[in-house]
Structure formats: structure tokens, C-alpha cells
Amino acid sequence: MAEHEHVRVAVIGSGFGGLGAAVRLRREGITDFVVLERASSVGGTWRDNSYPGCACDVPSHLYSFSFAPNPDWPRTFSGQEHIRAYLEHVADVFRLRPHIRFDAEVERMAWDPERLRWDIETAAGRLSADVVVSATGPLSDPRIPEIPGLDSFPGKVFHSARWDHDYDLTGKRVAMVGTGASAIQIVPAIQPKVGRLTLFQRTPPWVMPRMDRAISGAERWLHKQLPFTTQARRGLLWGIRELQVQAFTKRPDELGFVERLAKRNMARAVEDPALRAKLTPDYRIGCKRILLSSEYYPALTRPNVDVVASGLREIRGNTLVAADGSEAEADAIVFGTGFRVTDMPIAERVVGADGRTLAESWKGGMEALRGASAAGFPNWMTIIGPNTGLGNSSMILMIESQLNYMADYLRQLDVLGGRAALDARPSAVHAWNRRVQDRMTRTVWNTGGCTSWYLDANGRNTTIWPGTTGEFRRATWRVDLAEYEILRAPAARETAATTVPATPDAADRGERPGVTA
């Protein structure tokens, strides 16, 4: 990276959000941009999560970009290797690699109010940018709980998102901590080879069958020859999930029927009533993400598997002690304990206009205008920001909506001309967040009786979108300048004043000069 390189747009991350932003920039005719990636390859969470059995729980044709359909998906629910290959393909087809700076983790970035730009320090050097698009993703930094004795555990320890492929689990006593989306894929994948598998389950998940199958050669041929069939398949998958949203957001009681189906699914696989009791949730289905697996329950019934219906309390040498006092011996501990979602590390590295970090600004809870713009952080946008997550559909739909917003944001800057920046008005951010939180009160995520990673330390749901993807698409189709303050660089404003007659409504448009030191 050239010293003091300046670009119009800097994108952080090369997962779905980052690559999608890069493609959209090129399609908008913008080529003066870089993608800053902390690793040595693209892929984001689908590069980092390579654990045994890793796959997506959203159908393949919906979990891909609308502008880059893949007629050759091998399975209805594709595995990690296929999704990562798809992202590599996107990087190649859209000629993104010249823009990507690998091994360039962002260490700090600060807003310069005089030059109206972001000064960025990375592991590969420094640069500046007029606009920053943060696409680090909420599932990028693993969270391992603080457990007494963990540091002195003599065996192997790793998180599911940092799988150690050099460590052979064959014949080992393995403890799996957590029962989330990763764990229910890992357990059946490693159960046949380990000597003993102990699953520490703090809260049982609701699990439905995963109707996965190979996509036939005839189907793939049809999709290649008649591209509209791929679009139709995607549209059908989207429509079904849009119809399901009402039950999650407005009428959670309707999910009782789905609970009965989930219990029947469990009963078919688990005959032991004591084990079934351990695995039966006591909260409304949908409060936590509904997990999909046809192998999880059968794996738990195998002779070499123990389910401990209690969280891990402490570790004494090779002995793991649960909160209920039960003990298990282990040679290796695998944590499937999620990620830093509501306290993302990148927020600690972003310094805004008033000298505060984004983490400090979000101390009371994350909030961003239309899930994209934070007050006090001009020309900074985030992809998959606060309250843009989904509980039942594809995040690619939300990402593409935010890319529409990003594109119009840049168009508005072009229309303004000169050195300009947009800073979300605090009143607009609070009004948007208030509407979102008001809608959240009756959703299953808030009323379902569970504690999930959707909630922050204050108990607020700052992650999920309480509506349909169509609603979000309409809400992010255009940038409303009334929701932003227009900043002008001091020098540019003075120059403009000598050549352009003053307009009496400048203040009404929200224009103000940048703050000088």
C-alpha cells in the first residue's frame, strides 16, 4: 500500500458485504476505491469458519447475490467450501482483486474535520478516504467466555471459527461448549471419530429438519440454459420467507404449530425420555434462531455422547465442571459460543468528529440511521449495521438493500459537489431507532422468553430487523438529506462564498462548516 494513498471510498472487509460494496461501486462507475482485508484471502465468515460440517442454513439460491446468480450450486443448502468458492468467483468475475489490500487490518481510523476525510492506519500502511464503508460483519470476532481455570487447561482449546485442522480429534475426549448454529453442525460431524463427546448445553435450541439434497444435473442444466428459472427459484424462496415474517414480528402465538412439529422431529430421533427432557426448550420457538439439522439429534443418542444440561462453570486440569456440579474429563475443548455482535471490536478503532470512538458513542446500545449511519461519524457507513439482522431469511437481501443506500449516498455527495460530507442528525438516528424498538416490543425475539445474542448488555434488541426484507428495501432505497447535516470543508466554503451568491435557505438545508481545531 502506497504511503499516504488517498481514495474516494475505503471498504473494510471482503465477505459478502465488502465484495458486494465493491461490485456496486464499480457498477456505479466508481473505481477509486480499495477493499481493506485483514486476512490473506476473501470470504469473511465463510473463510474463517471452516469447521467440520460447516454449511449455510439458508437455501443456496437465496444466499447469493441477485446480480451474480449461480446456476451451478451443488446442493440446496451449500457447504462452506462452495460458498467460499462462490465469493472467490465474484472477486474474479467483477475484477475486484486489483482493489483489494490483503493483510491490511484496520488498526485505527479518525475523522479529519478540516479535510473532511478519514485517516486510516492499517497493518499494511496508512491511507485516507473521503468515505468509509465498514463491512466487517457481526460474526467475525469470536467470543470465548471467561471460565476459571481455562488458562491452565493442559489440552487443546479453540473456537469453532478458528478451527485447528492440524489437531486430530480421533479417539480424543472432546468437550463441545455451546449449542448454537455451529455446534449442531460440528457435533454430528465429529461424533463418529472422537472417543467421547461431552456437550455442555446452557440452553437447548429448537431444531427442525434440514431438507438438504443434491441439486440434480438436470436442474443445473435448466438454470444455465434458462436463467429466468434461477430467478424464479430465488423469488419463490424469498416469497415463502416473507410470508413467515408476520408470525415472528406480530403474532408469535402462531408459532405454536411450528413448536409441535419441532417436538415431533425430536421424538422421532430421541427415544430416551430423559434425554428428550434435556433437549426440550422452555421458550417460544423463534426467540432464538431456529436451527436446521437432520443429524444433530441422532448424534446425541450415540453411546459415546453425553449431554450436560448446564453451562461450563470451571476447569480443574483436565476436569470440566458444569454449573450443576457434574464433571467430565476432556483432552480438547471446542467453543461454539458465538461472536462479539453487540460490541464489535471495529467500533473501538473508529474515532468520530468529537474525538469519541464508535464504541463510546454506542455505550448505551448500538443505533444507526436506517442501519447504516451513526451520528457524529460523517461519511461513514456500515453494512449489516444495527437492527439489520434477520431471524428467518437471507442476509444477502439486507446487504443488497444497504448497497442501494450506499450508492445513493455517494450520488448525493456528487450532487452537493466540492468537499462535502454527510453526518446523520442525532434526532434522525433516535427517531429511526425509536420506531424500530417500538416495533420490536411485540416480536418473538423480545417476548419469547429467552436470552439470546440478539440482545445487548442492556437487554435491548439491537441486532434484528422487525419487519420484512421488502420493507427494509423500501426504507433504504433513497437517502433523505433532511436526515443529515451537510458539512463543508472550511477552505472550500470560503472559496465558494466568493464565487457563488449566498442562498438564504442554506441553513434550512442543514449545511454547516467542518469544525476546525
Image: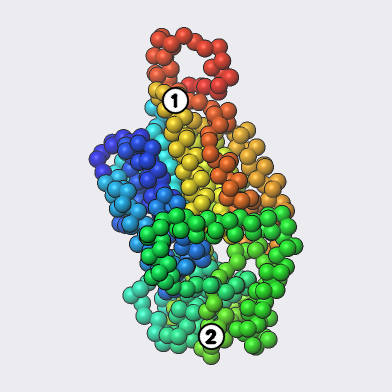
Q: Which mark is residue 315?
A: none
**CA distance for labels 1 and 2:** 63 Å
Q: Quadrant of residue 314?
A: bottom right
Amino acid type for the residue under numbered disc 2: Val
Pointer 1: what residue? 415
Please state the total of marks drawn on the protein image.
2
Residue 309 location in percent, x, y? 63, 78
The answer to whether residue 251 is left or right of residue 225 is right
Q: Dot 1: what SS?
A: helix
Q: Quadrant of residue 242?
A: bottom right
Question: Mark 1 or mark 2, which has the lower sequence index?
Answer: 2
Q: Residue at x 46, y 9 (%)?
A: 501
Q: Dot 2: what SS?
A: strand
Residues at circles 1 and 2 in contact by the CB criterion of under 8 Å: no
Query: How many residues crowd mark 2 within 10 Å: few (<14), some (14–19), many (20+)?
Result: many
Quadrant of the frame with the N terminus: top left
Q: Nearer the viewer, residue 195 or 183?
A: 183
Can residue 476 be spotted in the picture?
yes
Residue 149 location in percent, x, y? 50, 73
Quadrant of the frame with the C terminus: top left
Q: Residue at x 61, y 51 (%)?
A: 468
Residue 473 location in percent, x, y? 55, 44
Q: Residue at x 45, y 51 (%)?
A: 66
Q: Which mark is residue 305?
A: 2
The answer to whether residue 409 is left or right of residue 242 is left
Q: Nearer the viewer, residue 24 or 388?
A: 24
Residue 462 location in percent, x, y? 60, 50
Q: Is residue 479 above or below residue 291?
A: above
Q: Is residue 22 above or below residue 145?
A: above
